[in-house]
Image (tube, helix red, strand yellow):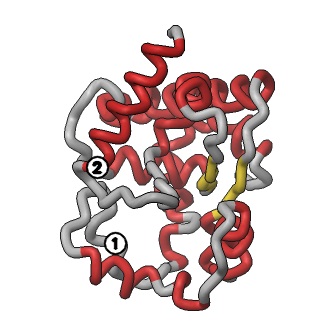
Amino acid sequence: MDEDKLRQAQRRYFELAANHAELRPQSLLIDKSPLYLQRVPQILRLFPDARFILALRHPADVLLSCFMSNFRLNSSMSNFLRLDTAAEFYDLTFSMWERAGDVFAMPVQTVVYEKMIEDPEGQLRPVVESLGLDWRSNMVDHQSTAQSRGTIKTASYAQVTEPLYRSAAGRWLHYRKHLEPVLPTLRPWIEKFGYGL
């Protein structure tokens, strides 16, 4: 991609983003999609100063949640129709993320779901500060923020106005016998991220 095509792609990205949010000078645009883990080279080519927030959760809980979600079907979400393809998709996605980290300098802040339940400020403050923003205590009040936004167009729309809850952590254990066939695929990530089986 030459510089002209690069500038065209950047302009087009911001045109599309403007359909979803008011873009003002000096705004910080945060574009959230877990599948962007697969797109690090493209993101860094378009936006060399991009920073990344990695949201981690026990891989078996992630897999179960995606399997049970009613996603709008597309080529990516079709991977979650079966546990085996969901596990393979998870493995491939994080393998791509790791490979990108080996090749590119990626400023990454990690938020761990299970730790955030216990200490939201402890998990979120470093992220906010790494983005060059000032920490405000109301930033942990996600319920008020979500309610003030109006329509929410994500798979978790019904959850964002609820309090953080512990029942989603370790939920996979209730379905362990169903997940047993895919645990060998997830095991390396479970261990790498410091979780247990």
Mark 2: which amino acid?
Ala
* Residue 61 picture location, percent across and down: 53, 54
Residue 78 vs residue 151: left or right? right
Residue 110 vs residue 154: left or right? right
Q: Nearer the viewer, residue 175 or 72?
A: 72
Mark 1: which amino acid?
Gln
* Count of numbered marks: 2
* Residue 73 picture location, percent across and down: 21, 34
Vertical position of residue 107 compared to residue 121: above or below = above
Residue that mark 1 sits on: 159
Residue that mark 2 sits on: 18
Q: Residue furthest top?
A: 2
Q: Residue 42 shows which numbered tag?
A: none
Taking the spot 20% from the left edge, 41% from the top edge, the residue there is: 72
Taking the spot 34% from the left edge, 77% from the top edge, the residue there is: 146
Q: Nearer the viewer, residue 27 or 174?
A: 27
Measured in 3D between alpha carbons, the distance from the residue under mark 2 to the one under mark 1, in whole angstroms, is 26 Å
Q: Nearer the viewer, residue 113 or 1?
A: 1
Element assignment for label 1: loop
Instruction: Answer with mark 2 or mark 1, whichever residue precedes in sequence.
Output: 2
Vertical position of residue 111 compared to residue 15: above or below = below
Residue 185 vs residue 164: left or right? right
Taking the spot 33% from the left edge, 80% from the top edge, the residue there is: 161
* Residue 192 picture location, percent across and down: 79, 43
- Tag nearer the camera, 2 or 1: 2
Asked if residue 115 shows in the view, the reply is: no
Q: Residue furthest bottom?
A: 137
For residue 83, which quarter of the picture?
top left
Taking the spot 51% from the left edge, 43% from the top edge, the residue there is: 179
| Label 1 neighbour load within 10 Å: few <14, some 14-19, many 20+ | few
Vertical position of residue 160 compared to residue 195: above or below = below
Mark 2–mark 1 CB contact (< 8 Å): no
